[in-house]
Image (cartoon, rainbow, N blue to C red):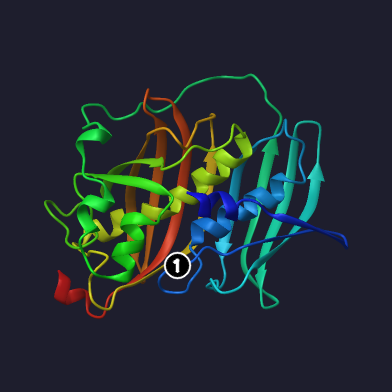
Amino acid sequence: MEGLLSALRLTDTGARTDEDIFTGPSQWMPRGRVFGGQVLAQSIIAASNTVPDDRPIHSMHGYFLRPGDVEHPITFSVDRIHDGRSFSTRRTQAFQHGQPILSLIASFQTRDEGFEHQIEMPHDLPDPETLPSTADVLGKLDHDVARYWSSERAFDVRHIPSPVYLTVEGERMPHQVVWMKAFGRLPDDVRQHRAALAYASDYSILEPVLRAHGIAWATPGLKIASLDHAMWWHRDARVDEWLLFTMDSPSASGGRGLSLGRIYTRDGRLVASVAQEGMVRVPDPAALA
């Protein structure tokens, strides 16, 4: 958990051109690539640092441009595109080695009143305490990725009906649900909780694409990478309390898969919606049919 908190503590370099410049560390990952959720969360924090505290982020749209290198820090440049009476718009670009690895636009809004409705949370699901954790599933495996996922990630993730780490059990369907919660306590800071929610949303959002075709993460030759990520925050929530993440994949084609998700608090409040398209390639899709 300290790794996540450290990653979200960006340094204001004091440098100014026509943009605000921040730097942040890269979290270690077993394959040497920066976790996409990390650079998303850091880019959100960078943008949030240029907006008044009473304007939390409500939406963002980002593109992953290049893989990040965990051996090097990341530089974030924030363009203050617009500040209106109620909304502020920012563009953040994340750089390594002088090249952009992620570009996003985010919108922030003052607290306001208006109509209220939401799609209801699914019912009759098992409680998170009754489900195996990632450590329960992968903890005994002697593999660098298994060790990292089981004991070093910032969030506890518990799957319904079952994980797709090693095998895909049961019906092949483009739908899944996970409970997720940060392992440690976060400060009482709305900006950090919203950024951390973006971080956690990148863990499993593409898994319905894999589940639909019976493809586990351990499938030999599988290549999967996030291409873009969009998110809308509807209501406040703490990421250090259990959240339900429902995901569906409406389409896969051309070596790409699209997933849509909704995130609820345990008492049923819809707090965020998520969309991501990713590259998903296997050596011979026909052999897996």
Q: Position of residue 172 (x, y in %)?
A: 16, 55
User: Is 41 placed left or right of 100 in the picture?
Assistant: left
Helix, strand or loop at mark 1: loop
Q: Callout 1: few (<14), some (14-19), or many (20+) C-alpha neighbours within 10 Å? A: some
Residue under the point 56% across and 55% down: 40
Residue under the point 50% across and 51% down: 199
Q: Position of residue 210 (x, y in %)?
A: 27, 61
Q: Kindly indicate the quadrant of the structure image that contains residue 31.
A: bottom left
Number of residue marks: 1
Q: Kindly indicate the quadrant of the structure image that contains residue 125.
A: top left
Instruction: From this view, report whether residue 202 is shown above or below residue 31.
Output: above
Q: Quadrant of the C terminus?
A: bottom left
Instruction: From this view, report whether residue 243 is shown above or below residue 163.
Output: above
Q: Position of residue 57 (x, y in %)?
A: 64, 40
The amino acid at mark 1 is Met
Instruction: From this view, report whether residue 172 is shown above or below residue 48.
Output: below
User: Is 161 placed left or right of 50 in the picture?
Assistant: left
In front: 241, or 208?
241
Which residue has dot 1 on it?
29
Q: Residue furthest left?
A: 170
Q: Position of residue 197 (x, y in %)?
A: 50, 43
User: Is 135 placed left or right of 230 in the picture?
Assistant: left
Residue under the point 20% across and 63% down: 166
Residue under the point 43% across and 25% down: 269
